[in-house]
Amino acid sequence: MERHLWSAADILRGAMDATEYEGILSALLYLKRANDEPGGPLPEHARWERLGDPASGSLDEQLHSALSALGERPGREQLRDLYAHIRFSAVDNRRLARLIAHFGRIRLRDEDLAYPGMLGDAYAYLVESFADAAGRKGGEFITPRGVVRLMTELADPQPGMRIYDPCVGTGGLLVSAAKYVEEHGSDPSDLTFAGQDPNHGAWSSATMNMLTHGLERFTLERTDALTHPMDADGGFDLVMSNPPFSMNYRIDEVPHLDQRMPYGHTPEQGKADLMFLQHMLDMAVGRGGSVVSVLPMGVLFRGNQEQVIRSRLLDADVIEAVIGLGPNLFHGTGIPACLIVLRSTEQRNPEHQGSVLFINAEHEFHQGRAQNTLLPEHVRKISTAFHSRQEITGFSRIVPRDFLAENDDNLTVRRYVSEETTGEQQDLQAHLKGGMPVSEVTPKLSLLASFGLEPSDLFAARAGSPSYLDFRPRGERPNTASLTAVARRREQELWNQFEKSWPTCVERITTHLSKRRIEPRARPTLAALRVALTEAVREPLLAVGLLNDNALNGAIAGWWQDSEYTLRALAANGFLAVVDGWCDDVEALLGRSGSPRRGDRSSAFDREAAYRHPVVTALLPGFAAELEKERAKKADLDAQYEELGPEGWSADPGTKTEEDTARKDFEKARREIRVRIRNLEKGFSLTAARSRLDNDGLRAVVLTVLRNNLVGRLNEKISQMCADLVSTYASWERKYGLSFQEIEDRLPGAGETSRALRQTPWSERGSRGEQDEKASLLFNVIAAEKLIEAEEAKLEIKQHFVLHPVLDSTAKQELDSARLSLGEVLRRFSYGVAGPLSTDPRGTPVVAPRNLTADGLDLTALRYTTEPSPAAARLRPGDILVARVRPHEDRSPLRFAVWRGEISGATFSHAVSRLVPHKDLLLADYLEAWLRHPQVLQQIEVLSWSTERELLNTDIVLPALEEQVRMVHVIGKLAAERADRKIQLAKVRLIRAALRSSLLGGDASDA
């Protein structure tokens, strides 16, 4: 259904602004559903089969007439003007006819849907997708799904409630409340909903959202809640809303002002936030209800009238919680927001009165390209802290009213719940004499214990000094490989326990489904199933000790989000329907079924999506592995073929080169492998594999998919933990693994500089003697720093001087060097892949300008792409990468690096250039050294780097390969010495800053 709606949007693409797509598609979906669902005769003008009749006028007139007629049905009068605002005339008749034919391909009866409410979920997807596509304008009336779910879990709606949203937008909060009640085993049909929004389009979307989710008891008004409040009819049990931020209003237009807003009035210009909040509270007090609202952070700390209102709300003891959210969570605005929970005094727990719970969730989000999102694990963590009133260091805190008064009723979350931002510890004794302070290992003991490690597994005990541990000798220290091996052993324990626990999950899923079959009218309690499945895996896996409570809860919450729709469809229609639905989905992506899709043929992106579908692994486990193996072979051949360069590229155009002969062999091999891949894909048939399954086989496929999804989520958490272990030890070694004493021993005259330090520990000196010793030592450190700087500078000169013979006009004659243009010695010059990148490591790694530094490659902050990249764009060992520090700025400094195959399958971004040298003419390391030489840099940095012509015409002096090898060897040796000096220099500067801070005050991190 999602694909069907998106394909419909493709028909409109280019005809109008994206913000108008949703209304047209929503109208056609509503009209088609009305025609397909049983329930009495339709008005003649509303019949689908009449659309396109030339005698009935233009298509836009016919559609308006049909939609208007639907509102004339008895009991549907509130829908009369539902789509009166839609501009069908903005779309030409040809596109409208294609749209009508597109929607005519599917039937929308309940029995055609995978599960009850599926049409509503698809519609919600449509609304949110266009909000993402349209940016600020499109997202004005929609609250992101993660925030909606968080607000709902905080509100905890119950059966029979009256629920209201004064700024209803597309109705997502009301629908979420209904789904929450249903998930917990109750009937949402006894809920009563109300909402307001002055925007016709938002009112229309909210109405459609309610109808497609099967909700009938609702009243939505096209009015402004501040100036035309709806009749509360005794009030509401729950008010949830995301009002517009910092809106203007006119105080003389607000009726019953003092009665509705008893806590005070805000300025009219851009300060309506607390007026909306008071209106919500007014609508809830009649029934002793509660309020959950999104507000901008400014309402928490601004002074004057807003401070007065905050104080009065606190005095009335109606503020239960303030939750700070992260940045860029909302469509169209990057500013961070907060959630405020209000509860009438009679509804508040007596133990909670007189205090406010603050939760700092500013770092609880998943970073996206254009917008951040709240994932299920973030929602779970925040809602658990809220409902349990847990106080968690750096995350949540209960603050009494009198303490808030001492802070002028400023409710800024960071004021009461802040991260521990103390500067990084700097142990002078460890810096100077070596060793690892036990005090800095202690906070990481839980991480070590997760992998079954003790500090003694990483360090050696220091005799007579229990406060320090010694690093092992350099050849025996843990590294990434050894720590990963340790992690895998503990990981295996977790998987062994998982294998024991999974049958319990299977039994509970089966029991849930069998109850549904025995009692067809019973409402499937998804919340109970979620609890049962969580219990089945959580405690056994927690006992292993690898993943902590938060990590496990996050993995399970993410898995539930992945699997919820599958379980709904399973409860409604069984294993057969679910597997058939998956197979249809894959076949549609491959363009092999009658299902609607974009275009007539499958795109490469769609094929990849089809082959990655979890049902493919479950039904054809060998296919994906075989396809990947053949594709890897093809990519390798393609890359080698590209290295041959263009046909006939030779110094003598009339000469047939060895490459021309090799090219034919490659072309033959590439054709053969393309045929094998084509035959493999041609023989791919889920339908055939599906036809061989009996009921037990269908059941096994669904359970395999569910299991693999959970395994994937657990793997993500385990990978994060393993990376944390490796980075923790690496940071310890980087900080204390090299002492000042070791550095001194390698410098001239080091023996006399700190004799007193070696003889007397800090703890045994008097305070004056210690300070004098520190001052003396600081002078020695400064002297050592200058000495190392001088040594490093000399090595740099020596390194560049190696190339002097080929750059000096007189000396180069002795080397039998050739002067060629750079274009003559390169096989290829190319730019990388364009398009957006993300931090999601499941994509292809992309080397960007940020990864090229003055010292070479830094791959610690890679970005990734999910778009398919051609084999020619994959990096191969020996490629030279070039980029400007600021890619779009001419004359910005250039950075260079040789790619040595650090990550397999990596590519590079469009802001990076790749130079591929002829291996028989030019060594990659020689080219890098030549490019880095100051004399060469001075020439090429002034070139326009957006076009390669000027660079390729630049002359390079090329000695024989044997001489290049010799030069590269010398340069490499000097570079290694320079790198060692730079490490020493960084360490000495850190010690200098720490000593200075100890003596004079300041921040040691200034180093």
Image (cartoon, rainbow, N blue to C red):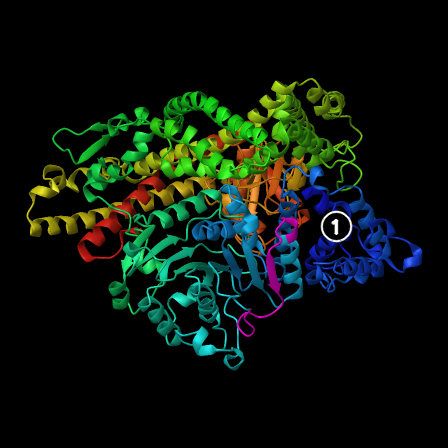
- The residue furthest bottom is 252
- The residue furthest right is 55
Left or right of residue 367: residue 629: right
Q: Is the residue 670 above or below the residue 144 in the image?
A: above
Residue 923 position in % (x across, y down): 57, 32
Q: What segment carries the magenta color? A: 211-230
Residue at horizontal 63 percent and vertical 38 percent from the top: 115
Question: How many other residues sit within 10 Å of disc 1, few (<14), some (14-19) or many (≥20)?
Answer: some
| Circle 1 residue | 34
The amino acid sitting under disc 1 is Ala
The rendered magenta stretch, by its main secondary structure, is classed as loop
Residue 518 position in % (x across, y down): 57, 28
Q: Say if residue 875 shows up in the picture.
A: no
Residue 838 position in % (x across, y down): 55, 44
**Judging from the image, what secondary structure is the residue with disc 1 in?**
helix
Q: Is the residue 673 above or below the residue 402 in the image?
A: above
Left or right of residue 11: residue 769: left
Q: Say if residue 104 shows up in the picture.
A: yes
